[in-house]
Image (cartoon, rainbow, N blue to C red):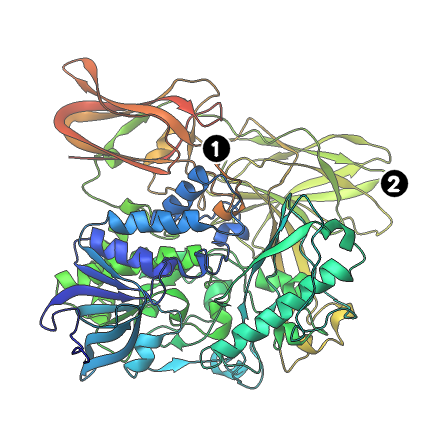
């Protein structure tokens, strides 16, 4: 006898927010909405959470800092990845069950949040343009799940909720004329970014043979060209391959099962090549193929249309949206049509062409709330890669840390919209509601590029800050010499104080004739500015043949606390060989750049390649500065620049961008930072934002890593009755944000005493907030 199918959830019960999709962005959105006071149901079609980051798929959790200096995402996702690195002894690539368990712990300890695993949503219950409930089938339990939500968040990646509810969406590539995108093809098509399955092999103590199954693709006589390279061994492990990607002619949703099979055929064939046919196959004699992913990691499918569609124009130049809720900074990452089935083309154009790369490597840009809900439905928000963007616009947004940061913002917005009875559109078009949301997001540590702290409740903003700051000193140990074959620049975050300066550069000339190098300075808006602006000529340096020395020019800058670009021109004569010294370990907020003067089109060597033809992409002429990561030029400034003074902790910016925005103490601990008020204030809460190395993506850090720059031990003290009273203390910290709450007290001074870091000799604090 068959038992009746009883819904698991009461059809009359309503939660505030239903989140469908438990990848990193959906999970963070659900936690954010719950923390903001909403009752939340999180529905995931897999038994584990994390989506592509989970141990089922094992895609690295990357973000903006992989491409742009000092641009790590903030908020909950940054905190999660700091925790993962600090507690996981293995490397970040590939992700392991450690992350699965960590995410489970987060969900188990979040109030007002209920989760439904292995539940596939297959039906929407509608009331006009409003979704009233979602219906799903829970595998294993054979239960039908009915969830009624005031607002819903589609975090499925495929835009499955939106599609079932009848929302408009795009799939594939738009035609160039639709949005005027030069990187779009002339004709629209259904080609999309593809899916990849990862693999892992481990070295054993004995030789391990491998025989490919008959259905594997034969790579034994295949020549891999362009950027399709085999993975290198990393100790005992080998993992990969990002470029083993299947897109055309498969549909990323409807052909998912066929894509999985095709990916397995490729991976097994490539492993056979590595083990049995590659020239360096002896390196893998002892390696055993221990794991192949069973779930394809998708890059793109449906993109649901919102009130704003993010396009190429919005990512190559920051629009400073009035409703910004996060930032992106990955590159315009558009893999080529055909993917692994098209070995005659590079897997990604930017790896093989400098003129394409100069366009694709965008500076950080803001993302608006209006791209994060469906324009057709009254209560559907969008997070993850199904948000409202063109194919080109999605390229630099689609990575997991960027999407998860947006998930936190959208989750919080949904909770506020439910509380005030607003639809997503009503909320996003209400300037007052958006402003309040932005200020709360900043308080939570979400990174906004153009919105400073304006919280009227924050007493720190009215304080006088006392503390000794460290002057900027660029490294002077030479690690490399770079020929001035194109203009090069050193960006410093700000001078800090006005006055006449002398700028000295370490140059050498191994040639036989004197080199003449022009030096200019330019005031910037951010440390990432790419477009050349109006510059001041400082002079010309003559570098004699055989010279290796410091060369000096004078500079009287305008009064400004903005970043400065010190640029050295290229030596016009190709026979000259003037070089500028480089060093590693750039100080916070500094950036090295070189100028790309592109004539239009790809490099000559790529002119015949199909994926660079005019019907596929158009590379117009341009002049742009391009970042060069994790390095600094040897540059002296006298008197020294002072971008790390104590008052930076209350200037409204908690990340590098429009300056360094960081206090760094002299290299001696303990170090003290003090806030003083003219009149007594009642304080019961202090927020601190520490330096967690925003220049290094968390997925690039080793196991058990704690950023040396981060404050480990500190205490908060209030001046009460003429005596300093400790109200909070922490030891062993590795997180960016610490929120200290304590019994409210009346005080006219507060100080933070740093007694230890995780390795750096100085104390480093980005922001201090103080509340009653």
Q: Nearer the viewer, residue 427 or 641?
A: 427
- For residue 577, side relative to residue 67 (left or right): right
At x 86% / y 36%, what residue is drawn?
545
| Picture quarter with the C terminus | top left
At x 18% / y 77%, what residue is drawn?
5
Q: Which residue is mark 2?
A: 511
Is disc 2 surrounded by few (<14), some (14 to 19) or many (20+) residues within 10 Å? some
Q: Are marks 1 and 2 in contact (CB under 8 Å)?
A: no
Q: Nearer the viewer, residue 212 or 444?
A: 212
Is disc 1 surrounded by few (<14), some (14 to 19) or many (20+) residues within 10 Å? few
The answer to which quarter of the image holds residue 163 is bottom left
Q: Nearer the viewer, residue 128 or 583?
A: 128
- For residue 446, side relative to residue 457 (left or right): right
- For residue 400, side relative to residue 433 (left or right): right
Marks counted in the figure total 2
Image height check: is 511 above or below 551?
below
Q: Position of residue 37 (x, y in %)?
A: 16, 53
- Whether residue 298 is visible here, answered yes or no, is no
Give the mark nearer the N terminus: 1 vs 2.
1
- Whether residue 589 is visible here, answered yes or no, is yes
Image height check: is 376 above or below 383?
below
Give the SS element for disc 1.
loop
**Gap in Å between the C-alphas at discs 1 and 2?**
38 Å
Q: Residue furthest right?
A: 512
Give the SS element for disc 2.
loop
Q: Which residue is mark 1?
A: 498
**Foreground tag (1 vs 2):** 2
Q: Residue furthest left?
A: 12
């Amino acid at each position: 006898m068959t038992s009746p199918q009883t819904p698991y959830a009461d059809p009359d019960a309503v939660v505030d927010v239903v989140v469908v999709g438990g990848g990193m962005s959906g999970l963070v959105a659900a936690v954010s909405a719950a923390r903001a006071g909403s009752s939340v149901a999180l529905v995931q079609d897999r038994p584990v959470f994390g989506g592509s980051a989970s141990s089922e798929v094992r895609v690295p959790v990357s973000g903006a800092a992989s491409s742009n200096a000092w641009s790590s995402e903030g908020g909950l996702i940054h905190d999660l990845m700091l925790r993962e690195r600090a507690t996981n002894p293995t490397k970040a690539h590939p992700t392991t069950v450690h992350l699965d368990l960590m995410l489970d712990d987060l969900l188990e300890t979040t109030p007002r949040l209920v989760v439904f695993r292995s539940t596939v949503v297959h039906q929407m219950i509608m009331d006009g343009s409003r979704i009233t409930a979602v219906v799903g089938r829970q595998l294993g339990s054979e239960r039908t799940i009915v969830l009624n939500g005031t607002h819903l968040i589609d975090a499925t990646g495929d835009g499955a909720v939106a599609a079932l509810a009848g929302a408009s969406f795009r799939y594939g590539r738009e035609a160039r004329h639709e949005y005027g995108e030069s990187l779009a093809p002339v004709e629209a098509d259904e080609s999309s970014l593809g899916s990849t399955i990862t693999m892992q092999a481990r070295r054993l103590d004995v030789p391990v043979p491998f025989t490919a199954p008959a259905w594997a693709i034969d790579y034994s006589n295949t020549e891999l060209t362009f950027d399709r390279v085999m993975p290198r061994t990393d100790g005992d492990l080998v993992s990969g391959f990002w470029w083993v990607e299947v897109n055309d002619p498969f549909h990323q949703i409807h052909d998912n099962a066929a894509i999985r099979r095709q990916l397995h055929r490729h991976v097994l064939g490539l492993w056979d090549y590595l083990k049995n046919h590659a020239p360096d196959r002896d390196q893998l004699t002892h390696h055993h193929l221990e794991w192949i992913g069973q779930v394809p990691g998708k890059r793109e499918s449906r993109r649901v249309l919102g009130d704003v569609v993010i396009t190429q124009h919005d990512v190559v130049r920051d629009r400073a949206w009035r409703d910004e809720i996060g930032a992106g900074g990955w590159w315009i990452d558009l893999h080529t049509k055909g993917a692994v089935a098209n070995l005659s083309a590079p897997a990604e154009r930017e790896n093989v062409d400098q003129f394409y790369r100069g366009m694709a490597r965008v500076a950080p840009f803001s993302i608006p709330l209006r791209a994060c809900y469906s324009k057709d439905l009254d209560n559907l928000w969008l997070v993850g890669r199904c948000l409202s963007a063109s194919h080109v616009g999605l390229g630099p947004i689609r990575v997991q840390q960027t999407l998860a940061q947006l998930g936190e913002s959208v989750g919080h917005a949904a909770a506020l919209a439910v509380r005030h009875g607003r639809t997503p559109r009503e909320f996003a078009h209400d300037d007052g509601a958006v402003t309040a949301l932005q200020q709360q997001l900043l308080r939570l540590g979400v990174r906004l590029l153009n919105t400073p702290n304006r919280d009227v409740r924050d007493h720190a903003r009215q304080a006088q800050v006392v503390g000794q700051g460290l002057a900027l000193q660029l490294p002077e140990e030479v690690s490399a010499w770079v020929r001035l074959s194109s203009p090069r620049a050193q960006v410093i975050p700000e001078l800090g104080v006005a006055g006449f300066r002398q700028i000295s550069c370490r140059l050498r000339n191994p040639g036989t004739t004197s080199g003449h190098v022009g030096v200019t300075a330019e005031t910037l808006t951010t440390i990432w500015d790419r477009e050349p602006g109006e510059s001041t000529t400082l002079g010309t340096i003559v570098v004699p043949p055989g010279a290796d020395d410091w060369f000096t020019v004078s500079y009287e800058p305008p009064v400004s606390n903005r970043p400065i670009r010190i640029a050295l021109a290229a030596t016009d004569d190709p026979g000259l060989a003037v070089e500028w010294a480089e060093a590693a370990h750039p100080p916070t907020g500094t950036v090295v750049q070189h100028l790309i003067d592109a004539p239009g089109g790809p490099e000559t060597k790529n002119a015949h390649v199909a994926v660079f033809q005019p019907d596929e992409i158009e590379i117009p002429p341009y002049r742009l500065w391009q970042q060069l990561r994790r390095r600094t030029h040897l540059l002296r400034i006298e008197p020294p620049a002072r971008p790390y003074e104590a008052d930076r902790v209350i200037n409204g910016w908690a990340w590098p961008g429009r300056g360094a925005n960081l206090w760094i103490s002299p290299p001696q601990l303990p170090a003290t930072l003090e806030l003083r008020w003219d009149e007594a204030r009642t304080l019961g809460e202090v927020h601190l934002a520490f330096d967690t190395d925003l220049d290094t993506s968390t997925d690039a850090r080793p196991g058990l890593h704690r950023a040396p720059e981060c404050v480990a031990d500190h205490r908060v003290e209030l001046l009460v009755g003429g005596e300093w009273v400790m109200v909070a203390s922490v030891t062993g910290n590795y997180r960016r944000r610490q929120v200290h709450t304590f019994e409210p007290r009346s005080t006219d001074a507060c100080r933070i005493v740093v007694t230890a870091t995780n390795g750096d000799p100085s104390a480093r604090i980005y922001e201090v907030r103080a509340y009653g």
